[in-house]
Image: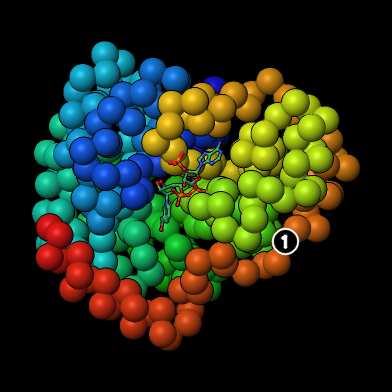
Amino acid sequence: MEYVELNTGTKMPILGFGVYQIPKEQTKECVLNAIKVGYRLIDTAQSYFNESEVGEAIAECNVPREELFITTKVWIDHYGYDKCRASIMKSLEKLKTDYLDLVLLHQPFGDYYEAYRALEDLYHEGKIKAIGVSNFYPDRLTDICLFGRKVIPAVNQVEVNPMNQQTEAQKNMQKYGVQMEAWAPFGEGKNGMFTNDTLQKIGEKYHKSVAQVILRWLIERKIVVVCKSTHLERMEENFNVFDFSLSKEDMDEIAKLDIKDSLFFNHQDPSIVEWFDKLIEERKKEE
Ligand SMILES: NC(=O)c1ccc[n+]([C@@H]2O[C@H](COP(=O)([O-])OP(=O)(O)OC[C@H]3O[C@@H](n4cnc5c(N)ncnc54)[C@H](OP(=O)(O)O)[C@@H]3O)[C@@H](O)[C@H]2O)c1
């Protein structure tokens, strides 16, 4: 495993396992399998509704807690100082741990300033080893770095994949010392990601799959990446990316695939902001 060093001085594994859309009843087994394969970074969120099952796996995996790197994300409905703090206490309980390695604000909507202040205090109290944000586009990230509070986010987790490469966003993060972390590295298979010609041809050269080429491409760019699979053989495949590297020509070819747009949605589109507002009500019912 390779690591990056965050602006807190903490080490973070460059490759991790994400549990978004893994049903509760499968989560514990998937996380236990991922840890057996070698993943040490586990990425969950309050709004994935599977923190308790991740916690069961953490408790049963027989890997010392300090070897694991556990991330959760605070949901929008839990923003504001007191609500954010209380929600993290609940997350700690569900995850069966007395500290978290990284806590991110999940979305750039609502009272994220006060939520960030709660993260800062928990960071100073040692309950959270690093704090950060997610889906903060360059303008929002710059805002929180300049006008936010005293602790610069350690991480910004955003969509990054060969179709949405986020090179300008990465430069902006580097300017402020914020580590970029990629979600949906495979774009969940959208836009023919797994059958893309360029990625397949590069893979053939190294006897690697498209998924492995994508993960290696992110690692070459020093981007932390979390990927998800419920299949053990794919967890292994996705982990097996540390024995090859891509040439400059390969990187240049992949650069051409960039459509500079999300495969999912644009957080700056007002209709998407409205959609998130509705999502808050829907997710309340699941809590
Ligand atoms: N911060 C955010 O807003 C945000 C948003 C989305 C995701 N995330 C995080 O990022 C993680 C990864 O993103 P994601 O789950 O959305 O998408 P992803 O990792 O790009 O794609 C997951 C999909 O790819 C399939 N897959 C995985 N490995 C494969 C392989 N080697 N060959 C073929 N298919 C493969 C999986 O199927 P199977 O499961 O059937 O194998 C699943 O359908 C999430 O789990 C979550 O932790 C964060």
Q: Residue at x 80, y 38 (%)?
A: 202
Quarter of the figure that contains the C terminus: bottom left
Q: Secondary structure at mark 1?
A: loop
The residue at the far top in this view is 62
Residue 232, quarter of picture: top left
Q: Position of residue 41 (x, y in %)?
A: 41, 32
- Is residue 278 toward the left or the right of residue 243 in the image? left
Of 105 and 239, nearer the camera is: 239
Query: Residue under circle 1?
Result: 258
Residue 34 in view, yes or no: yes
How many numbered dots are placed on residues in this image?
1
Quarter of the figure that contains the N terminus: top right
Q: Position of residue 184 (x, y in %)?
A: 51, 51
- Is residue 36 toward the left or the right of residue 214 in the image? left
Q: How is the image coloured?
A: rainbow
Q: Position of residue 179 (x, y in %)?
A: 53, 47
- Is residue 152 toward the left or the right of residue 197 in the image? left
Of 252 and 102, nearer the camera is: 252
Q: Amino acid at mark 1?
A: Asp
Of 216 and 191, nearer the camera is: 191
Residue 39 in view, yes or no: no
Q: Position of residue 274 (x, y in %)?
A: 34, 83
Image height of 262 relative to 209, above or below:
below
Image height of 1 relative to 191, above or below:
above
Q: Residue at x 31, y 24 (%)?
A: 32
Q: Residue at x 32, y 30 (%)?
A: 31
Please rate how many residues cluster around mark 1, counting C-alpha atoms within 10 Å: few if below 14, some from 14 to 19, many from 20. some
Q: Residue at x 27, y 78 (%)?
A: 277
Image height of 10 relative to 88, above or below:
above
The residue at the far right in this view is 249
The residue at the far bottom in this view is 270
